[in-house]
Image: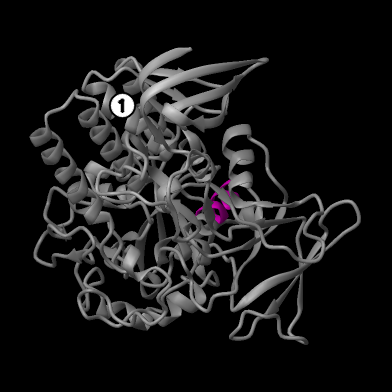
Amino acid sequence: MKRYDLIVIGAGPAGLSAAIQAAKYGVETAVFDENERPGGQLFKQIHKFFGSKEHRAKIRGFQIGRELLAEAEECKVHVHLNATVLGLYENKEILVREGDETGHYKGDAVIAATGARENMIPFEGWTLPGVLGAGAAQTLMNLHGVRPGSKVLMVGTGNVGLVVSYQLLQAGVKVEAIVDAAARVGGYGVHASKIARAGVPFYLSHTVVKAIGTDHVERAVIAQVDSHFQPIPGTEKELEADTICIAAGLSPMSQILAMAGCDTTERGGTVPVVNEYLETSLENIFAAGDVAGIEEASSAMITGRIAGTAAAFKLGYLEEASCIEEIGRLRESLRQLHEGMFSPQNRGKCDIKLTDEGIDISESLLKKGYIEEQELNRFPGVPDKKIKGLHPVIECTQNIPCNPCQDACKFGCIKVGDKITRLPEVNLEAACAGCGKCVVSCSGQAIFLVDEDYEETSGTVTMAYEFLPRPAPGTRGTAYGRDGKAVCSAEVVSCRMNPSMDHTALLTIKVPKDMVMKARFFRAEEEMK
């Protein structure tokens, strides 16, 4: 039997963060994961994270994964891969299936960071090939370079459904529609907006009722639902689709903790009961990440560090005062992510009408996936008067925990303040240098640079662009509005990219002067054929 001070089950963002944190205090730590590579969900997340610099905001998930792996190696964490933990037993012993052998290990403390699994929705034809979870589609695309289909129906408007829908578009897949039984978009509005302006329709208060096909999905049937989320007969609509992606939430994988005898409760699924140190009802057994409650990966990494700190203290590697100080600092960091409209206490609420600043929330954004132009001027990121020359327009209208735009601008054009969930504000007195750093740093692609004075009859709009091929200067095409409908002809002025932009190009298009506040997406003529 092999012994370690600390055993961590799961090498995702929470597990790796917990192992690194404990190992920094001198705890001999081993991590076990059933997959052939560590990092969990991080390595299929190609989008940029939200939060602040401390939360690794504006860094893509797979890059964060690489950073964690490098830290784990530097801290000499023992990482066991292709190692399936079969059980957690008395005295914190585990059995692990490694290849054709079963290993026996014991830890003085155990941290379970086993994550969560995708939920599915049963409907007629749901066992046909072509029906899969959104996370599985993300794995196919971003880890294996395989398109899951050519025409996809996405079910679910939470952040997973929205993020994966955008990544499907990036992979050249047509997203036929996004449906959700809820009456409002569940994820961040900025995620929904970048999909809507690409022309993807939203069907709220709808669900999928049938997949049609012989040996694979060929079409999908959706229907409107009533107040009890039951399909309304006569409202069926048939869509062309060879793939149906389900993004219906996640359920914590807490079975191994229940097997060990930890007390559990129901909170978005069965989760272990934990104290302020994330310790379960069994001494020196901790839980971190989604297994203790579904949240974003940023939160999972912080809870992992809390559990790793607590384990180091309980094992005698850290003084109590230092433990309390470090966990207090980490909890403050977590608190920042738990504020605003998407805070845990607001989860499931459908009656939020105002932002934290007292501004009416865009009903169009919640019901259609995009904000109407006439709603924009009430938000502090959108100037309510004409500004001469180049200036930013920030179409971020929800209290999302994120502030990279403020850090990116060295000229004082953008202000968020100390509270990272406040709406970003454009400083009309500051002069914009046109560097575009705010545009590429925005994780929600919600910032545009507008110049109404570019030419006598034309203006320019600069936007984040993450599609291939990148259009060359002089390329002609069509500009699209926030609702995904064509608004005018457009010509590419420039498409800038350098290593610091991290694969986000700055696309500048020339449009008629009266279109600069309408044009928000571009397609070249070749793409439209």
- Residue carrying label 1: 20
**Which corner quadrant holds the C terminus?**
bottom right
Q: Is residue 328 magenta?
A: no
- In the picture, measured across the screen, residue 260 lies left or right of residue 150, that is left
- Give the residue drawn at x 68%, y 15%: 100
Q: Is residue 120 visible?
A: yes
- Give the residue drawn at x 57%, y 64%: 156
103 lies above or below 137:
above
Q: Position of residue 99 (x, y in %)?
A: 64, 16
The prevailing secondary structure element of the residues shown in magenta is: helix
**Toward the viewer: 88 or 39?**
88
**Toward the viewer: 307 or 275?**
275
Number of marks: 1
461 lies above or below 313:
below
Label 1 residue SS: helix
Q: Where is residue 491 in the image (x, y as percent from the top left)?
A: 47, 57
- Give the residue drawn at x 48%, y 38%: 260
Q: Is residue 164 magenta?
A: yes
- In the picture, measured across the screen, residue 245 lies left or right of residue 336, that is right
Query: What coloring was used for the rendering?
Result: one colour
Q: Position of residue 88 (x, y in %)?
A: 50, 32
Q: Can residue 494 be seen in this view?
A: no
**Toward the viewer: 275 or 182?**
275
Q: Where is residue 485 in the image (x, y as percent from the top left)?
A: 55, 72
Residue at the farthest right position: 214
- Magenta stretch bounds: 163-171
- Give the residue drawn at x 45%, y 76%: 366
- In the picture, measured across the screen, residue 229 lies left or right of residue 396, that is right
